Image (spheres, rainbow, N blue to C red):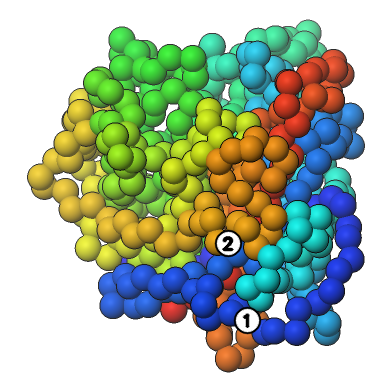
Amino acid sequence: MKTFALLAVLVKAIVVLSGPVSTLTEPDPSLAFSVSVDGQTFINKGLVAFGLIPSNFMDSTGNTMGGIGSAIAIKPGSFVQQADGTYTGTLVVQPDRGFNVDGTVDYQGRQHAINFVLNPHYTTSDLSFTQAQQTLALQYQDTLLYTERQGVKTSGLDAQGVRDAQSGFPSTPTADPVMPIANKTYTHLTLDLEGLVLNTDGTFWVSDEYGPYIYRFDGTGALIQTIQPPDAIVPLTNGDVDFTSEDDPDTGRAANQGMMTFPIIQMIADIHTQASNGGNKKSESRYTRLLAYDISQPLEIRPALIAEYVVPLPQDSSGDTIAASEISFVSDQLFLVLSRDSDGHGGDDTESSYKGIDLIDISSATNIAGSDFDSHKNPVAKKGKLDSSVTPATYTSFVSLINSTQLVRFGLHNGDPSDATLIDAKWESIALAPVGDPQNPHDFFVFTASDNDFITTDGISLGQPYNAGLDNDNQFLVFRVTLPTK
């Protein structure tokens, strides 16, 4: 197996606040929690920062800036420790498909650049909600819009159509309305964006939930390459490709469940929800797949699938699967994965039972790439039962986003009341940055952000005002962890 290494990406943000700088160099030891994976000790040193972007903040296109926790990354070279102990950098954040509570909309794919100042809070003392926002100050910078072939803008509309394979691109999800260009009409490539990886050459990769595919764009936001997953993952209904997110297909990815991309040197990898094979989706979809592609070849050569592993996800007390929302590289055998329920502010209920940034170890897992399990006719875990020939990755809980002791330190809580200090429901992103502590060389900051579903009482979507009945801010959390293999 090739050695994996993380490619750093972008990070920036919104309301700049000033505050006292901690005199401590690391969190109080009483806040630490450790786990052992394959003989190595990984330490969660606790929550160290919190920030937010108001629910009604508008981007430079005049639309409400929401959903930005669908994917985040730290801009290469931007993360710097300052003399006063703070850290500055730039986040690139990527929303999904726009305000779609009342139906999908023709929302053009995009990414936002956000500057930040990180001032870690290391003591056990409790901050007020206002004070907590001084630990991660955010300031919006700009927005980059995505286009596909012929310069047609991408869309967030539900993928009701299929564009046949052409010009080196596989069949792709499309939606009306069509765009007239040079006396011809072009359907929109439609994207429900999730993963984001920025390359050092200015290009970047994204993943979506309609395909679920991986797309590569150039520095101007123009599409240049598409990776199609194995047949077992492509959604099929009655044998035909069916990209819609409104209903589950017969086989392939479940509706509204797609891919989360993470970066590796000369490789790109994704984790996705298990193929739908009938039965109760939540209780029988525990097993997901992690895929790795070789992207070291020239642009005209389609990336080859070189590794594929089965990953077991956690389940709640009723046996329902806690779905994965993001994955991030740690080492060639170990990854961080974010699994969470949909409860919290803006969610189904106020009290969340599971939100974790956890560890998956593939050192003993079976590589099923190129096997019969890549066919939709041979599910690897039919009705939730994993095939006996396959050894899955090992899943270990690590960082809890809903630990009450940690939340209280930043003026936050889990459960009633439903107010601005309630932790958001949907957390879907991970970005790592080195602490730079010589005494703790394997310590990293773990950034994560929420997808607030563009929920606000004062919103603008495609030029039209809307009121979603709730103000749900875009929340950010930063943890400090020790990753001995990184």
Determine whether 271 is above or below 418 in the image.
below
Q: Amino acid at mark 1?
A: Glu
Q: CA distance from mark 2 to mark 1?
A: 15 Å
User: Hey, which residue is sitting farthest front in the picture?
Assistant: 417
User: Hey, which residue is sitting farthest left in the picture?
Assistant: 388
**Crowding at label 2, few (<14), some or many (≥20) Cα neighbours within 10 Å?**
many
Q: Residue at x 38, y 65 (%)?
A: 334
Viewer-side residue, 394 vs 153: 394
User: Hey, which residue is sitting farthest bottom in the picture?
Assistant: 439
Q: Amino acid at mark 2?
A: Gln
**Crowding at label 1, few (<14), some or many (≥20) Cα neighbours within 10 Å?**
some
- The location of residue 309, given as percent across then percent down, is 29, 50
- The location of residue 99, given as percent across then percent down, is 70, 24
Viewer-side residue, 123 vs 100: 123
Mark seen at residue 26: 1
- The location of residue 86, given as percent across then percent down, is 78, 75
Q: Which residue is mark 2?
A: 406
- The location of residue 291, given as percent across then percent down, is 38, 48
Q: Quadrant of the N terminus?
A: bottom left
